Image (tube, helix red, strand yellow):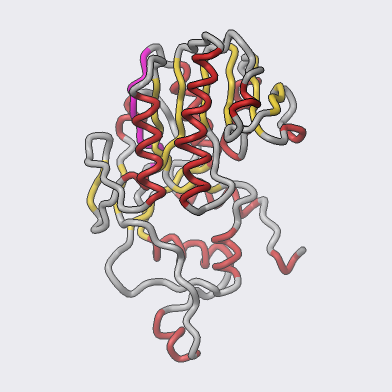
Amino acid sequence: MARVLIAGCGYVGSALGELLVADGHEVFGLRRNPENLPAGIKPVRADLSLPETLVSLPTGIDTIFYTAGASRSDEEGYRYAYLDGMGRLLGALADLAEKPKRIFFTSSTSVYDQRRGEWVDEESKAAPSSYRGDIMLMTERLLLAGEIPGTVVRLGGIYGPGRDRLLRAVARGEVAASDGEPHYTNRIHRDDAAGCLRHLMQLEAPASLYLGVDHEAAEESAVLRWLADRLGVKLPEPGDADREGEAPARVRRAGSKRCRNDRLVESGYRFQYPTFREGYEMVIRGWARPEDG
């Protein structure tokens, strides 16, 4: 069995850690406040933004997953969490003369700037126009240029238990369908994000890059209408909003693109939640509406 370090053991990392512990691996979870890690994950109290806290990393690690998330959404927060954090981790490993077999980094499909529904895969040009995508791409390059073998998994929008922002907005009538051009979105359920990382760790020679998205690049309004139907509410249409005099907010939009997961599927991974329908069905079953307490 392997010794595994999950650096930034948060929403996805904790789910991954539980899978790996169940497989019999020795799993260490690194984060600033590790008290509430799932059972079986050994806590490592450290801060990826503070190099002095990384001097006592566990030794003899076989595999590292870098699944950190930014605690702030501004440019500085992103740089600290991703580019600087990855650099500090790589530096600490070098100082400790540690060389794991592979480092996996959960990046983002935000590195793509396609906006007109183009199909995107691992061979597509990544030329981000936002600081989020820029920093993710720089972090990928930092990892892949190093001496330790690296694999980047560009995840779509992560949803799952506890992430109910969209459900709340639909239930309250706070978002409206669009009457413009189709706007394509790409998602992955938390459990599949963790599951595909576990799967890739098991491969003898994983590729350096995968897209981590489910089987359907879903049109945004179709997702909203499906959720409204399942929640038993009426989704405001653009005309309805005009008559009421106050337009519901739009879902925050990134570039409209359709991401392919062919490489991940061909590697042997099988999705637990192939589309947003199966995934959100699971979330809805365990969801208590705000008005229900």
Q: Residue at x 40, y 26 (%)?
A: 143
Give the residues drawn in magenta, as a range: 205-214
Q: Residue 180 occupies which quadrant of the picture?
A: bottom left
Query: Is residue 208 covered in magenta?
Result: yes
Q: Is residue 98 above or below residue 226?
A: above
Q: Residue lying furthest front in this view?
A: 52
Q: In this view, does 187 lie above or below 56?
A: below
Query: Is residue 59 covered in magenta?
Result: no
Is 15 situated left or right of 202 in this image? Answer: right
- 254 or 178, nearer to the observer: 254
Q: Residue at x 45, y 17 (%)?
A: 102
Q: Residue 92 occupies which quadrant of the picture?
A: top right
Residue 118 point in image, percent of width and height? 23, 51
Q: Which residue is drawn at 30% across and 48% down?
A: 128
Q: In this view, does 102 lie above or below 120?
A: above
- 153 or 137, nearer to the observer: 137
Residue 199 point in image, percent of width and height? 47, 23
Q: Residue 140 occupies which quadrant of the picture?
A: top left
